Image: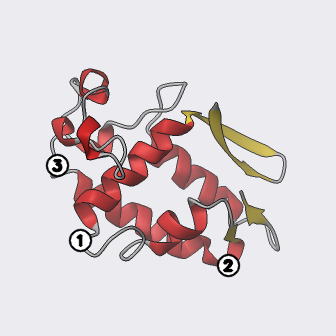
Amino acid sequence: MAIGFKIDFLSYQAKHRDLFHSFCSTISYYLEPRGWGTEFPYLLIHFYNGKLDWVDVPKLIGELKDIRERLKYIETTDIILDIEDLSERGSLRKRECSNYSNLANCFLVNDGRNLFDVLLKTLENSLIETDKEIA
């Protein structure tokens, strides 16, 4: 099943939902020593669970920019597929990410764009809207 991000009539498809879960698992594993959502609640609690109020979009944008910068220092062989099952740690995604130097560049959507770019564009476009929820 694919995952997408929608704002009003604009939508962005982002590959299989496992990509987004792996993206979030990798972020939490490396950047949140106190657990899921403790450092990045707007991404890993609100947005991940399907609802982010538009007034929180600037906070999520800030989190994503911080995360992207910090992931630049982690090699692609260290990807986390599922934080709840670390036995699969990186086994499938290593091949997909072998051409990239760090985790910030490793998560790509269907059309080859970086997931960070898609998320940031979606969120920045949402700032134009008012009283909308991003799902």
Q: Quadrant of residue 96?
A: top left
Kind of residue at disc 2:
Val
Q: CA distance from mark 2 to mark 1?
A: 27 Å
Residue 18: image location, x then y, percent: 49, 37
69 sits to left or right of 77? right
- Classify residue 6 as left or right of residue 73: right
Residue 79 marker: none
Quadrant the N terminus occupies: top right
Mark number displayed over residue 55: 2
Say which element carries label 2: helix
Residue name at image x 51 percent, y 75 percent: 59
Compared to 83, does 47 lie above or below? below
Q: Position of residue 67 (x, y in %)?
A: 33, 61
Mark positioned earlier in the residue sequence (3 or 1) = 1
- Residue annotated with mark 1: 33
Q: Nearer the viewer, mark 2 or mark 1?
A: 1
Q: Label 1 is placed on what type of residue?
A: Pro
Residue 63's quadrant in the figure? bottom left
Neighbor class of circle 1 (other Cα within 10 Å; few <14, some 14-19, many 20+) is: few
- Residue 111 in which image quadrant: top right
